Image (cartoon, rainbow, N blue to C red):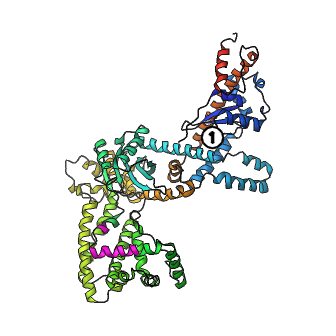
Amino acid sequence: MSKKRKWDDDYVRYWFTCTTEVDGTQRPQCVLCNSIFSNADLRPSKLSDHFNRQHGGVGGHDLNSLKHMPAHSDQNETLKAFGVASHEDALLQASYQFAYLCAKEKNPHTIAEKLVKPCALEIAQIVLGPDAQKKLQQVPLSDDVIHSRIDEMSQDILQQVLEDIKASPLKVGVQLAETTDMDDCSQLMAFVRYVKEREIIEEFLFCEPLQLTMKGIDVFNLFRDFFWKHKIALDVCGSVCTDGASSMLGENSEFVACVKKEVPHIVITHCLLNPHELVTKTLPAKLRDALFTVVRVVNFIKGRAPNHRVFQAFFEEIGIEYSVLLFHTEMRWLSRGQILTHVFEMYEEIDQFLHHQSSNLVDGFENKEFKIHLAYLADLFKHLNELSASMQRTGMNTVSAREKLSAFVRKFPFWLKRIEKRNFTNFPFLEEIIVSDNEAVCIATDITLHLQQLSNFFHGYFSIGDLDEASKWILDPFLFNLDFVDDGYLMKNDLAELRASGQILMEFETMKLEDFWCAQFTAFPNLAKTALEILIPFATTYLCELGFSSLLHFKTKSRSCFNMSDDIRVAISKKVPRFSDIIEQKLQLQQKSLSHALNAMTLINILIPYHHSSSFKLHEDSKSPRLLKRRSQSRLLEIPI
């Protein structure tokens, strides 16, 4: 990271002032043309070069023009004379709005000055005339400006989220997931869920790189430091949903141990979106071999460029729909179910292609038993894809997700009974190719063994189960049988009172469950708090998966060194930057900096009469910019009062 340069008051000799960004970075701004330069240009040689080249060394002004400097109360008019207040609000508004759209569309920052602004100027020249073109020309849209605008908007959005977290009446829920970008850099992403007014809000929290190792303690330190940095206690988190390697983010990982040590009450949940991996681990040997055969076939086709080109040409020639196969992946679990379906549906064509390429995979691929196992796996993973897709939405809570998983597992006994009777209705691909009783008996044995083992693993791994009877009032307080609630339960009276209200019944029938309980915070705070403590925790890391998809747009070959944490926040956050506040703060900073520069110029102007009579000279071409300041301060002591 390059060293940040600091402003020196001596730089006013080049007619520059200083603007300070939100992160403290100081950038020089020319008082004469209002141009803003990068922090790297904050050096005498650069400032002098701009002053001499663009303004002829004098810029139409000299220091003597400031002999009659207005009083501090009149400095606002002086600032307008320098062109700062004139049209500044509109120009900044346009600049921020474009930067916002640029981040939302995940475009590179250079698109403004390389494409958008030139096109806009051409259109303005043709349609509106040269005057409109001149106005558009003043809108700052350089690469550095867009980057700065996005950083400021990101900080404003983050500030809004942090304010909401601090004001939340309940502890917040967090979901964490990790991925590796194209630079092999591990990125940790987090989203937060909290209560605000009458609804539950889901918002982006951060996306930060893990600098060195990816151990559980590294994840915990990054997670903890984020809250500490913003002066929020870690115990504001009531639950954390994780995904990824068990050594890093699993339920028994070092990360979980560190979090529970810091926040003992916290609830740790594991993402319910990836049952595919569990299914793979429970596969019998024959079914596992069939899955690995599919992986080898796909890698043979996709892993070699000539094979892939021939494969595509072959399928285009015979008019098959799927000319491109998906790679098998571990983390992006949906690809596994889709690839099995595609391979089964293109079985004959792939077999022909393997023959054409004289592949040694032909024998295993043509095996009748393999095809039967492939059909079963395609059917099973298709069911899993449908289950996962049903949980891929915002607002999914642990109660709803576990209900879906429970409903899925409860189908297993019905499937097993049908399979015992050689009825494969629930497995249409398998039913399509079973032609003999002997084949049906063999595959039925394998399926029965696998489904029984899978059911046990589902219950143990995901802790599938309904709410206990005493807590089911959360799902429907009106149909719930109050006899299940112990008479000593303090909220039983509140439940009885709530059930008596017809207006609340109408709200329950028309609102989402989470919103309904948020709406009851005023009338029944204890009931609402108890219900929302169960509904707030995340059930999946779906939002992080969406964030990783956006990450692909930001981390590309042309933007590989690009720090995208601010861009991705602006792109995927639901919060809208407070443009008016940002612009007002920006103008105040500029006015303050210019006022400071004008005061410094006034001091120099006072010292000018003593310039020639001094026992020393103020060397304008001095190589040490601090010399002027020291001599000015020394001479100041000799000024008569």
Magenta-drawn stretch, dominant element (helix, strand or loop): helix
Tell me if mark 1 has few (under 14), some (14-19) or many (20+) residues whose alpha carbon lies within 10 angstroms of its own.
Answer: some
- Taking the view exactly as shown, the residue that stands out farthest to the bottom is 436
Whether residue 556 sits left or right of residue 403 in the image: it is right
Taking depth in this image into account, of 328 and 531 the one nearest to the observer is 328
Question: Which element carries disc 1, helix, strand or loop?
Answer: loop
What is the three-letter code of the residue carrying label 1? Answer: Ser
Number of marks in picture:
1
Q: Residue at left 50%, top 78%? A: 311
Of the 4 image quadrants, the one containing the C terminus is: top right
Q: Mark 1 points at which residue?
A: 38
- Taking the view exactly as shown, the residue that stands out farthest to the left is 487
Q: Residue at left 53%, top 54%? A: 560
Queried whether the magenta region covers residue 600, the answer comes back as: no
> Is 434 situated above or below 212?
below
**Residue 255 location (% of width, % of height):** 32, 48
- Residue numbers of the magenta segment: 278-296
Q: Quadrant of residue 405?
A: bottom left
